[in-house]
Image (cartoon, rainbow, N blue to C red):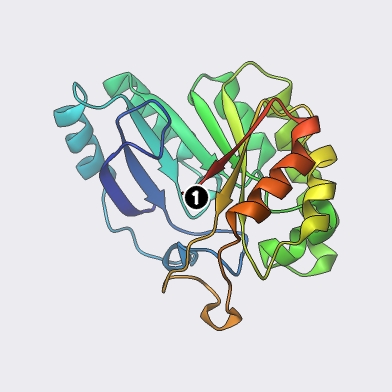
């Protein structure tokens, strides 16, 4: 596993759990508003060894309730399943996977083997704005959206707890995106609108992205609400 970041304790990343968060290196998307842009390069060296992580988990397993595997995009790691299996066998801790949903085969395999207990899947935008939000050329749209749809179906048709979430960015998203997004994620049990926060780690610092207002987020939430079980806001006072 290419482990490029490690947060020893978090009360936010895994709802209802005291957890630690492992950040893998490399991502196949280039979202211009990404706040983990230092983790995007596939050639990044590991900052932590698996042995260091397992030593920490062994020491803290009685205090922790879960492990979050985030990124970057964790499903790019070829040994992700082996790593999660070792965590389960060594500690019994719950595992939350953060993913962009572009590798449905890995997602399905990990769920079927019981290697993940909760999935948080990023939904970048409605279909017509997806490539803009993902930072990819339009010719990639059919390929990316078909994989995202398959991952959504795996989660919607299964029994594993999950959530869909969208980071809403002033400069990327407009009302039309959420008019499309509701039907796109129809049947989702829990959906979160996350407010973009300015950061000097954003991939495209020159774009001038901003945070949407609470009123805008509430408007977008109402557009999606008829299609999902619940809609909530995150990162807004």
Relative to the observer, which residue lies in front, 129 or 49?
129
Residue at 36%, 22% in the rendered image: 88
Measured along the vertical axis of the image, is residue 123 above or below residue 81?
below
Q: Position of residue 136 (x, y in %)?
A: 72, 67
* For residue 209, above or below residue 88: below
Residue at the bottom extreme of this rendering? 206
Residue sitting nearer the eye, 223 or 163: 223
The answer to whether residue 66 shows anywhere in this view is yes
Horizontal and vertical percent for residue 221? Answer: 70, 42
Picture coordinates of residue 174, whole percent (x, y): 76, 61
Q: Is 129 situated left or right of 217 in this image?
A: right
Residue at the spot x=61%, y=59% of the render? 28
Mark 1 crowd level (few <14, some 14–19, many ≥20, 10 Å Cα): some
Q: Residue at x 68, y 19 (%)?
A: 158
Circle 1 is placed at which residue position?
236
Secondary structure beneath label 1: loop
> In screen coordinates, is 47 left or right of 37?
left
In the image, taking residue 34 as reference, residue 147 lies left or right, namely right
């Amino acid at each position: 596993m290419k482990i490029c970041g490690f947060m020893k304790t978090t009360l936010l990343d895994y709802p209802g759990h005291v957890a630690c968060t492992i950040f893998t290196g490399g991502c196949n998307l280039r979202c211009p508003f990404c706040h983990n842009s230092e983790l995007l390069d596939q050639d990044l060296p590991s900052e932590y060894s698996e042995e260091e992580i397992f030593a920490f988990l062994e020491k803290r397993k009685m205090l922790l309730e879960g492990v979050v595997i985030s990124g970057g995009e964790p499903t790019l790691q070829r040994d992700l399943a082996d790593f999660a299996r070792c965590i389960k066998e060594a500690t019994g801790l719950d595992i939350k996977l953060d993913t962009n949903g572009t590798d449905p085969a890995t997602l399905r395999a990990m769920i079927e083997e019981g290697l993940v207990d909760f999935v948080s899947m990023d939904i970048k935008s409605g279909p017509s704005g997806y490539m803009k939000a993902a930072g990819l050329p339009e010719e990639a749209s059919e390929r990316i959206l078909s994989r995202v749809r398959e991952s959504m179906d795996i989660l919607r048709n299964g029994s594993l707890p999950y959530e869909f979430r969208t980071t809403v960015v002033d400069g990327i998203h407009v009302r039309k995106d959420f008019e499309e997004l509701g039907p796109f994620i129809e049947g989702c049990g829990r959906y979160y609108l996350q407010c973009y926060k300015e950061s000097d780690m954003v991939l495209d610092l020159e774009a001038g992205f901003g945070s949407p207002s609470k009123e805008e987020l509430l408007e977008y939430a109402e557009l999606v609400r008829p299609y999902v079980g619940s809609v909530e806001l995150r990162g807004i006072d």
